[in-house]
Image (spheres, rainbow, N blue to C red):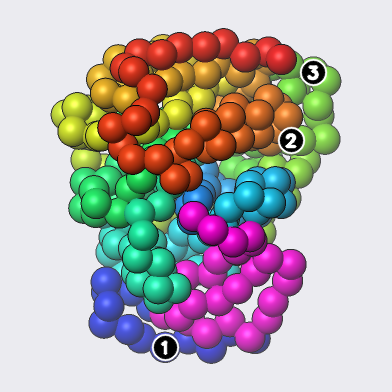
Amino acid sequence: MVIYFRSDRYGILGACLCRSSKHQKVWDMLNYRSEGKGTTVLLLHAFPLSSLMWERELEEIGRYARVLAPDLPGFGGSIRQQTPSLSGMAEEVAGLLDHLKIREPVVLGGLSMGGYVAFEFVRKFPTRIRGLMLFSTRASADTVEARVKRYDVIDRITKSGFEDFAKKISEKLVGRTSLQTRSQIVDKITAMILANKPEGTMDALRAMAERNDSTKLLYSIQAPCLIIAGEEDEIIPSSEAQLMCKQIVHAQVQTVLKAGHLVNLECPENFSLAVRVFLQAGVLNRAFSSAAPRGSEGSSDF
C-alpha cells in the first residue's frame, strides 16, 4: 500500500510506503536501502535501474561501513519530481541524509546517471563529501545530438511501450563479453527496469538531457576519488574516465576488463575489490589531503 501526500520541500510528491523487504526502508521523500554501521557510503544507481542494483554492495560494504542506497525520484519506490532535474535529485539525497541525522561527510558513489547526480551533490554540498566514486559516467553535458536522442527515446517509449524499451536498452547496458557469456545478467537487468514506471524513466531522460556541464567542477574536487570504467562500455567510453582522472586532484582510475556499462553487475568480484581497496586504504577515516596523487592509474582483470 502506498499513501501519497504533497510536500512543499523540493517541490515533489512525498509518499509513505507501507511495505518492506530486506535492506529496504522508507522516508517520506525517497525509498532507500541501508546496511551496516560506521562511516556512510552513499550509492546512487544508474539509469534506468533502482537501488536493487546495489544488493551485492549492500552486503559486502555493509560489513565494514554503513551503506545507503536510495531509489532516485521516479525509480523503485520513490515518487516522481514535479519538475525533473538532477539538481533536485541531489537536494533530495541531501534531505535523506538530514532525515537520518548523518552529519559527517560521506563517501559518495554514483554509476552513470548516479554519477551525474553525484556531481550536482558535490556542486551544492561540497563539505558533505569525504570521498567520491565515479563509475561509468562522464562530467560533460549532453551534446545537441545526444539531447535529441534522449527525447527520441521518450517518443519511442510512448509509441512502442516500456517493455520494448527495457529489452532493447538492457543489451546496450552490458559489454559484448556479458552478452556472449553472461546472458542471465541481461534478463536480470530487464526485470529491474520493468519494476520501474515508464513515467519516472521519461522524467529522468528529460533531466539528463538538460543537465549541467560539470567539467569545470572537476578541478575543485578535493576529496579522494576512485574512477571505474568498463573496457567494453559502448555508452560512455573508458576514455572519459581517463580524462576525469587527469582533472581531479586526488584521483585514481581502474579499467575493468571484459565489462560494459554496468560494471558492478557484470564483473562484481573485480568491482568489489577495487572499491574495497579504495575505501579501506583510509578513505573511510582519512583527511582529504592524504589521498592518492593525481592521475594514479590502473587496469584490473584480476
- Spatial CA distance of label 1 from label 3 is 46 Å
Q: Is residue 233 above or below residue 104?
A: above
Residue 65 x, y percent position in the rendering: 58, 52
| Residue 38 found in image quarter | bottom right
- Horizontally, residue 155 falls left or right of residue 261, namely left
Residue 242 x, y percent position in the rendering: 39, 14
Q: Is residue 188 above or below residue 70?
A: above
- Horizontally, residue 185 falls left or right of residue 119, namely right
Residue 194 x, y percent position in the rendering: 66, 54
- Spatial CA distance of label 3 from label 2 is 11 Å
Going from N to C along the chain, the mark reached first, 1 or 2, is 1
Residue at 38% over, 22% down:
292
Q: Which residue is mark 3?
A: 180
Query: Mark 1 is on which residue type?
Result: Phe
Q: Nearer the viewer, residue 155 or 283?
A: 283
Q: Secondary structure at mark 2?
A: helix
Residue 48 x, y percent position in the rendering: 54, 47
Going from N to C along the chain, the mark reached first, 3 or 2, is 3
| Residue 171 visible to the viewer | no
- Horizontally, residue 141 falls left or right of residue 216, namely right
Q: Is residue 253 above or below residue 134?
A: above
Q: Which residue is mark 1?
A: 5
Q: Which residue is mark 2?
A: 186
Q: Nearer the viewer, residue 242 or 63?
A: 63
Going from N to C along the chain, the mark reached first, 1 or 3, is 1
| Residue 102 visible to the viewer | yes
Badge 1 local density, few (<14 within 10 Å), some, or many (20+)?
few
* Residue contact between numbered discs 1 and 2, judged by CB atoms under 8 Å: no
* Residue contact between numbered discs 1 and 3, judged by CB atoms under 8 Å: no
Residue 35 included in the magenta stretch of the image:
yes
**Magenta span:** 14-39
- Horizontally, residue 263 falls left or right of residue 238, namely right
